[in-house]
Image: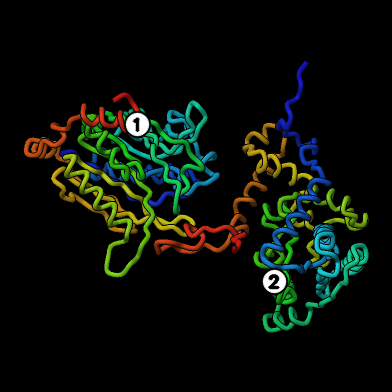
Amino acid sequence: MVTERLGAIRPDPRDASPLRIDEVLVRRMLVAFLREEAAKSGHRRVVVAVSGGVDSAAVAALAAETFGPERVTALFMPYRTSAAESAEHARLVARTFGLALEEVDISPQVDAYFARLGEVDRVRRGNKMARERKAIEYDRAWPDGLVVGTSNKTELLLGYGTRWGDMASDLNPVGDLYKTQLRELAVLLGVPDVIVRKAPSADLWVGQTDEGELGFTYAQADLLLYHLVDRRMRPAELIAAGFDAALVAGIRERVRRNHFKRLMPLIAKVSLRTIGHDFLYPRDWEAD
Amino acid sequence: MSIRIAIAQCAPALGAFERNLAMHDSWIARAKAAGARVVVFPELSLTGYYLKDLAADVATPATGERLERIAAASKGIDVCAGFVERGPDAVLRIAQGYWSGGSLVHVHRKVYLPTYGIFDDGRYFGPGDRFETFSSALGTTGIAICEDLWHVSTPYLYAAAGATVVLSPSDSPGRGVAEGGDLGTAESCRLMDRFYAQYLTLYVVFANRVGTEDGIAFWGGSEVVAPDGSVVARAPDFDEHLLVAEIDTHLVARERDRNPLVRDERRDVVHAQLGRAAGGPD
């Protein structure tokens, strides 16, 4: 009899089981992460942008559980084209986790900016919206709060996000969870079913869905990324195991092309000791 | 006898193996056209230096098919080029091959892996475990990859084993820009090349790369230093350059006649002393 090795690599496009996580354990780790990392930098309050989607709902739940709802500033920042459903769901999230939701309409500032520019690409407009929202989050974090990020591992790896926009934060509890894993965690955290089940969308223009824009599903991407990244398998091995060759190549290329989005700006080294190169201290640089 | 050598002071692409192969072809052609018998490329010339996790992606066995083009190119001119070797033990190492007449003649694996300051070699690579000389078009030769040369024992061991030429393919990052001087690193390297060449009475061939990776610039300044301590040729700093120089085997003989330091080395005393220092029997 052949006994399967624990943690064996099973690359199979029809078998999503390698993505399963122990949600109870992950919840414990993420709450501890938020509590300890905020405390080390002397912060006791956080800001979370709630979009009405599942990722920010899960992060809002984790923040409420960690800090208590009264120490969480939950912001909903719609643009005039945002789906009505987004507002309903954001309010539902706030009610579910006992948060006071602050609503800031970003239409005036975004429209004022673009009024001078005429017709511009919708992706460019979307980037601007994401950065306006982040600027508001940082403003609302002043003087004693931290901005908590909501970008998941799938988005970060694919580069499906706006640099210094939605991708920006001080702490990100969910950046190492693939979209499908984060959805599972959201269920455990008590995120309402209607939010967990709806099609993910950046809601930057009418009718936009992540999967429509990306051209593949999160289920496909996550399983592929898991084998590619977590298990260090090569594209050729995955294709041999039955994954679609074009999908493998396309996703691998997205990961490569967008790697810069995951890093701090490059500093040109000229001196004997350079920030980021050989001036390296932990972020958790604690005083006596 | 005079042998013409070329140094390809190039800027490899980071992690783009095929592109670097094509780049090698063009430098090899230029070196051939310049009449060189040997062309020396910098450390990891086929892969780039700050590979991090890309190291596994660009790795190849020393006799793997990825390197066949380099082997084939060596039918017309000897080629010394750098790559990431996936060893028979599956460990990744920083390697420099020497190809001649269509086949691989020698591989040196970087022994000293800098893992401090801006360097992280030890995180990604395993170390080589020996300094072996081999017979090249230039005579008895040893290869010291970048940090290898900073350890005094490396060129010494090669000299003790009979080397008359030390090739030092390097990826030396430039740093230290105090006013009025050379780059800090350049000054150190030049001092080293000259000192080793003169006091071990051999040729030092320093092949450094140029270009920038993740904000860190490699400074070039490749040079050939003769056994009398004179700089035979030096490439400019920071620019790509094919440096061509003559290596005069008679000069090694003449310097060693005049100054028989290597002949008179008491290898037995050094060996015994090192044995004691390493905790061996007294």
Q: Nearer the viewer, residue B9 or B264?
A: B264
Residue identifier under label 2 = A131
Q: Which mark is residue B278?
A: 1
Tell me which residue sits at (73%, 26%) in the image: A5
Query: What's the amino acid at mark 2?
Result: Arg
Could you tell me which residue is drawn at 75 percent across and 50 percent down?
Answer: A177
User: Which chain contains the residue that carries disc 1?
Assistant: B
Specify whether A168 is left or right of B184: right
Foreground mark, 2 or 1, reads 1
Measured as percent of width and height from the top left, residue A235 is found at: 63, 39
The number of callouts visible is 2
**Vertical arrangement, residue A250 with respect to residue A8, above or below:** below
Q: Quadrant of the N terminus of chain B?
A: top left
As helix, strand or loop, the secondary structure at mark 1 comes to loop
Residue A90 x/y as whole percent: 88, 66
Residue B50 vs B112, above or below: the answer is: below
Residue most toward the left? Answer: B258
Q: Give residue B136's position: percent from left, percent from top.
A: 25, 31
Left-right relation of A239 to B27: right
Q: Residue at x 33, y 26 (%)?
A: B280
Three-letter residue code for mark 1:
Ala
The picture quadrant where one finds residue A161 is bottom right
Q: Tell me the distance, in whole angstroms, between the alpha carbons under discs 2 and 1.
A: 61 Å
Quadrant including the C terminus of chain B: top left
- In the depicted structure, whether residue A179 falls above or below residue B274: below
